Image: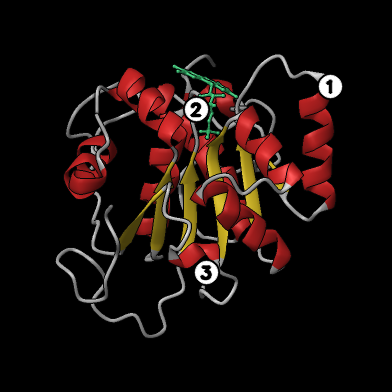
Amino acid sequence: MERARPGAPGRPGDERGRRPWVVGVSGASGTPYAAAVLRGLLAAGESVDLVVSRAARLTLRDETGVSFRDGHWEADLAAWLTRGADGTPGAFAPELSRVRYWSAGDLAAGPSSGSYPARGMVIVPASTASVAGVALGLSKDLLQRAAAVTLKERRPLVVVVRETPLNGPTLRQLVALDEAGAVVLPASPAFYAGAGDIQGLVDFVAGRALDALGVEHALYRRWRGELGDAARSAGHS
Ligand SMILES: Cc1cc2nc3c(=O)[nH]c(=O)nc-3n(C[C@H](O)[C@H](O)[C@H](O)COP(=O)(O)O)c2cc1C
């Protein structure tokens, strides 16, 4: 198991004052959303504690070709984050020194305790299984436990759910999460921001997630109160 130790190679050497966002990647389709959120947080100068569920390794392999391994997480994360949403390799050059990785099975990890100084958490993408687990307080792995901790500590929790259609139990669990204080943010790209490609649509969702966390970014063009902006930027008028 890969445990983070202060001062270990590739990890933040100085833990004092470090207030990371926990990013939980669960096994729903939509790993490009997670990549965009991670890049956005790092670009904003934020620290990140990353948890990748077992099922997310399958979606990651399916959607990017990257096999994510605990023992090689830095290289695997770099391979993943440099890829664009359309699979283009080398599209980005993220700086990873502010990332700390925790194995999903490590229930003794930092984010499993409320005394760990996390700012809050985003689950992106959020599977219906993780929605159910968090809504019911199952804490079956570190992702779910960290989310439960985030709620009990009244810290921001953003749940970027990705499934369609949604059934009654999932809808009720999403209401339960909303009532517990989470922001339920469906992975639902909008078309008013003038996205020109898949990455633009992905960045819209990631940008809305960062908005909910209160992190600054320039991932999408905000609404300016003028109808026709999207068509103009696409060259249709
Ligand atoms: C390729 C692939 C795509 C999947 N897409 C979704 C999805 O979009 N939404 C969802 O809720 N589950 C999806 N699943 C099913 C979840 O991976 C499964 O429910 C798993 O138990 C989730 O576990 P986790 O929440 O611990 O990551 C997908 C599974 C695979 C293999």
User: Mark 3 is on which residue type?
Assistant: Ala
| Residue labelled with disc 2 | 201
Residue at 20%, 76% in the rendered image: 7
Which part of the image, by quadrant, shows the C terminus?
Answer: top right
Looking at the image, is 226 positioned above or below residue 113?
above
| Residue labelled with disc 1 | 168
User: Mark 2 is on which residue type?
Assistant: Leu
Q: Earlier in the sequence, mark 2 or mark 1?
A: 1
Residue at 73%, 51% in the rendered image: 182
**Of residues 91 and 109, the one drawn nearer to the viewer in this rendering:** 109
Residue 186, picture quadrant:
top right
Left or right: 56 with respect to 78?
right
Q: Could you tell me how far apart the alpha carbons at marks 2 and 3 are, in whole angstroms? A: 29 Å
Residue 106 percent across, percent down from the top left: 42, 54
User: Mark 1 is on which residue type?
Assistant: Gly
**Of residues 225 and 12, the one drawn nearer to the viewer in this rendering:** 12
SS label for mark 2:
helix
Residue 96 seen in the current view: yes
Q: Could you tell me how far apart the alpha carbons at marks 2 and 1 are, in whole angstroms? A: 28 Å
Mark nearer the viewer, 2 or 1: 1
Evaluate if marks 1 and 3 touch, with contact meaning CB atoms under 8 Å apart: no
Q: Could you tell me how far apart the alpha carbons at marks 1 and 3 are, in whole angstroms? A: 32 Å
Residue at 60%, 61% in the rendered image: 214
Give the class, few, some or many, for how many residues have Cα within 10 Å of label 3's Cα (few <14, many ≥20). Answer: many
Residue 219 percent across, percent down from the top left: 46, 44
Numbered mark located on residue 118 in the image: 3
